[in-house]
Image (spheres, rainbow, N blue to C red):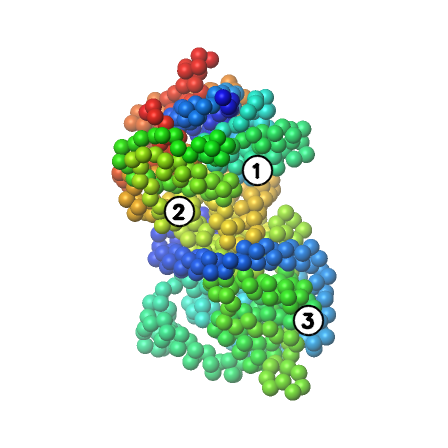
Amino acid sequence: MTRVQLFVTCLVDGFAPEVGTAVTEVLERAGCTVEFPDAQTCCGQPAYNAGLVADAEAMAAYNVEVLDATDGPIVVPSGSCTDMLVHHVPALAEGTGWEQAARRVAARTREFTQFLVDDLGISDLGVLREGCRVVYHSSCHGMRNLGLGRHARALIDSVTGVERVEPAQPDQCCGFGGLFAVEMPEVSAAIMDAKLDDLEATGADLVVGGDVSCLLHLEGGLRRRNSPLRVCHIAELLATEP
Amino acid sequence: MTVTPVTFVERARQAVGSDVARSNRVGAERLAGLREAARQAYPAFDEMRDAARQIRLRTLAHLDDHLQRFADQVERNGGHVFFAADGTEAIGYIQRLIQDRRVRRVVKSKSMVTEEIALNHALEASGVEVVETDLGEFIIQLAGEHPSHIIAPAIHKTAADVGRLFADKLGVPYTDDADELNRIARAHLRRIFLEADLGISGVNFGVAETGSICVVTNEGNGRLVTTAPPIHVAVMGMERVVPTVGDLAQMLEVLARSGTGQGLSVYSNIVTGPRRVGDPDGPDELHVVILDNGRSRALAADTAEILACIRCGACLNVCPVYRAVGGHAYGSVYTGPIGAVVTPALMGLDPWADLPFASTLCGACRDVCPVRIDIPRMLLHLRRRAADEGHHPFRWVAPGLRAYRIAATGPRRWRTFLGLGALAARLFGRSGRIERLPFHASGWTRFRSLRAPAKKPFRRRWGERHGT
């Protein structure tokens, strides 16, 4: 039994708890014992991307301390937060008292699909879904900074009853960009519209992604379009309990 | 007369969804496709990008030495060199030259650095006729606009737009046939080339070992501008030097492929000194104006790497923000991701502080950069500097994140914070959706529903299941 620590992310905690439950279920089915260090909060990425480095440092240092007190792989259901913990937090910690802890945490941190496919060697969980056409949304930070994409695609392809389709421009950003979505809403929405056109043109029923951030943004836009297209996190596709 | 809004946010708001933005997207996607095809057809491309990056970084590390060697060689070849600290000095030098030599007509080939210092405007104000000869720049000049793309200045215009412009300004019959429009421009410009007293070009690369300048074009106008008039003035950003001819060859391997998907541009013009005895043509005088204009400042800062840029425009074509708003929203001659870094790096964050925030940090720019500049990292540096120096363009963000930081650095405070979200969900999100948020958060709900916060956050679910 692999013991793993779940870093669930602030958005899952506050907006999409069912994703955390699904992640736990999938990891347990994959033979892991899941622990949840419940003092965890937010990795600090919103402040980091806003240029507010002192605030980002405070949040990152706090969570590094929480996570460094645990053992085993740290699994994160988000490419973007994983990228923050793996790449940016150690850079923030450079020259501080928590530098070594940040490095230890970074070395243990894995994105959910990456952990399943690369570390556990599992790309088929024997899941069955009723006939459903799925399009995968590749979130930028995971794709470009962690090399994600093949993991989720393999996992989706393993689901019996699912047909996976590709959009014309799979590498284009959805326009979320964190606070950007609120700071420059017109621009964010224009980018989102191009993305939604591309996703809808695939004829898919379901957008599956690895980052709740992009998914909340896309879901909000689809809702305004009255589109039948739905979104879900990949862990929800792979979980068997609804 | 239209009033130009001051900020990126305002300009972008006006651009989104416009016909101009649509033409811009079509053009950008076409260029991105050409670059991608070139990459696939050239297996060594990524290796060449690594080599090009090394050349640029190595050169920047000893830029003063390479520049001095370049200047010495230009003078040894019979050319003149002027180091201009800023646009005013560069313009002053060129204006003195124009007065001394009684120049009345100037032809120009495409040059971003002369756009940067608004050279045309200054020369025209002193009574000189200035004609842009690059087709895109010619169109922009006729329209009285600024370029919206580094290599395709009129990318935001359709053939029909250009047809109407030519009919209006040149008195020719309307056509939207691209070949015919090209013929009209060529016929119009040919006479002007032959009558010009002075040619002004940009410089893609200056070669230190030979004192040569390389000007890359697809239309042949660069060759005419640098050879037909009796005086040639080349204006060069001080970072555009490469040590050797071999280095130049390596840079050319990646430049056109990244910009237009061509193996090489149609003309790679290499000029070494003015006309020599026995040369059939060429200018009697060559002047090279080397411009600093903020580059030393950028070189000394955490944005130094941006000076490795070779102005291919690849980052613009793939940028989701550029595709959505077009170049004019950036308010400066440098547009897209590179503009979002270069403009504040050269000219300061005041009043350009919102440009580094005009990005989702998606990283598509870094993927295609011929010299692999980490543009997202530069944007983060500039955001940090904007926050530190009191130029953060969104005043509500810092207090908001300060409050969030307090919530996110203690387990009890975090539970309370999530509890407030749950309360909001009960009060305002009974349908599971929130359609209108107040204050700055309204930016979200203007275009998107918001899923209501969880009535039971994940940690409570976990606690109930695990009895903690």
Could you tell me residue A3's position as x and y percent? Answer: 51, 22
Residue B235, visible in the rendered structure: yes
Quadrant into which the N terminus of chain B falls: bottom left
Label 1's element?
Answer: helix
Tag 1, which chain?
A: A
Could you tell me residue A209's position as x and y percent? Answer: 39, 37
Tell me: residue B49, above or below residue A176.
below
* Farthest top residue in view: B467
Q: Residues within 10 Å of mark 3 (few under 14, many from 20)?
A: many
Tag 3, which chain?
A: B
Picture disc at residue A87: 1
Residue tagged 2: A170
Residue B466 shown left or right of residue A108 in the figure: left
Residue type at numbered disc 2? Pro
Question: Is mark 1 in CB contact (under 8 Å) with mark 2?
Answer: no
Tell me: residue B12, above or below residue A45.
below
Residue A9 shown left or right of residue B53 in the figure: left
Residue tagged 3: B210
Tag 1 and tag 2 share a subunit: yes
Picture disc at residue B91: none
Question: Is mark 3 in CB contact (under 8 Å) with mark 2?
Answer: no
Residue type at numbered disc 3? Thr
From mark 3 to mark 2, how far is it between C-alphas? 46 Å
In the picture, residue B223 is in which quadrant?
A: bottom right
Q: Residues within 10 Å of mark 1 (few under 14, many from 20)?
A: some
From mark 1 to mark 3, how far is it between C-alphas? 43 Å
Tag 2, which chain?
A: A
